[in-house]
Image (tube, grey):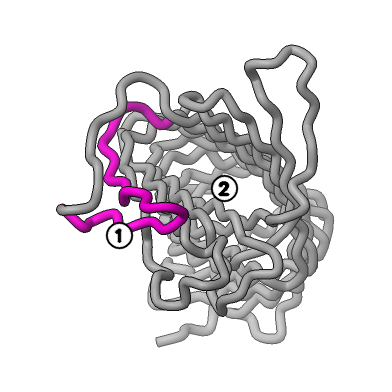
Amino acid sequence: MLVSSIYFPIFATDFTFSLSPSFGIKSGEMGEYVFLKDCSYSDDKLSYLEWNFKNPYIALESDMGYKAFSIENKVSYGFGAFTDTMTDSDWQNVSYSNLPNSQYKTNYSESDNFTKRDVSVSTKAFLSFFPLDWLCLKPLFALDFEYMRFAAKGGKYYYGKQYGYFYYKYNDSKNNSTGSFSGDVLWYRRWSLFTWFGFGAKARLFDKISLEADFFISPYSFALDIDTHCLTSTRYIDITEASFNSYKISLSLITPLADKSEIGLNFSFLSSALSRGKTYSKDLNSRFSKYLQDTSSECGMDEKTFNVSLFYKFYLF
């Protein structure tokens, strides 16, 4: 039940400042696509790479407030402590208009995915309103920057054999080839920028427990990735932009520990739907090679990320 009082820090000064160290686990997947332009079929997907990850991380957040206005800044760094999976799928028959009954997966491979870098920086600004003494409402604006770098190594492949320009299914045991990779297979880097606006609330529940919930939607997002295919010595650059295709939810349970300090458990989820853009490629075997736009295809990216973390917040003043 809700009670008539709520724990919000109130001090003699109108200005407050706090720090919040935290640690947690970030898991999810990043999708990388290639689509055929002017495709003869409803599904124009040529290729899909799924990068799965599960990274422990540490973070530090600062919160500065003056009266009703506050700004929160956060930096986090993830560690590639766990090996996950990268899968690579191709639909080679999509390129031909006379194969309507052959739009199945023709190539498939799995490799070990190693996280080499996981860095994010965010800032959030909001105003706090108290319509009730146990309830705080907040309009929100935020910016998130994220950089992820992966390396896919080793693994197995299943490729449908080619007959003329027709490809068999990847799992057709009578008409496929199988084998294994060794060493580096793919390197992948992605830079993402999200703008957010949303709404938040913090309420006092039971005795000395507060629940805080934020919901965001992104009016604009931008992503750039660099994908290096080590086995073919080809590098791709993909660029996408999108509007209102991403949302983020954050839930926190908070309890005070002592004067000017509190501890909390946070859960957050980010979903960025598929966005399409331009793709460029370069032959790494030629020192004179330049990036050229592929006018016959376009790229795509999506992302789903789940975070759980434990934080400790202390107020300096």
Residue 236 in sight here: yes
Please tell me which residue is depicted at 37% across the width and 47% down the height of the picture. Answer: 87
Task: Indicate the quadrant containing the C terminus: top left, top right, bottom left or bottom right.
Answer: top right
Q: Is residue 120 above or below residue 116?
A: below
Query: Which residue is the extreme one toward the left?
Result: 173
Q: Secondary structure at mark 2?
A: loop
Q: Residue furthest front?
A: 164
- Range of residues picked out in magenta: 152-173
**Mark sitting earlier along the chain (2/1):** 1
Q: Is residue 159 magenta?
A: yes
Q: Quadrant of residue 113?
A: top left
Amino acid type of the residue that numbered disc 1 sits on in the rendered structure:
Lys
Within 10 Å of the Cα at label 2, are there few (<14), some (14-19), or many (20+) other Cα atoms? some
Q: Relative to the observer, which residue lies in front, 278 or 116? A: 278
Q: Above or below — where is 48 with respect to 196?
A: above
Residue 269 x %, y %? 49, 63
Residue to which mark 1 is pinned: 169
- Which one is nearer the viewer's eye here, 170 or 96? 96
Mark 2 = which residue? 260
SS label for mark 1: loop
Residue plotted at (36% across, 52% down): 163
Q: Nearer the viewer, residue 78 or 286?
A: 286
Left of 134 or right of it: where is 175? left
- Which numbered tag is attached to residue 244? none
Locate the N terminus and report the quarter of the image it occupies: bottom left
- Whole-percent x and y of residue 266? 45, 57
Viewer-side label of 2, 1? 1
User: Could you give the CA–CA distance between mark 2 and mark 1, rounded to whole angstroms?
Assistant: 63 Å
Amino acid under label 2?
Lys
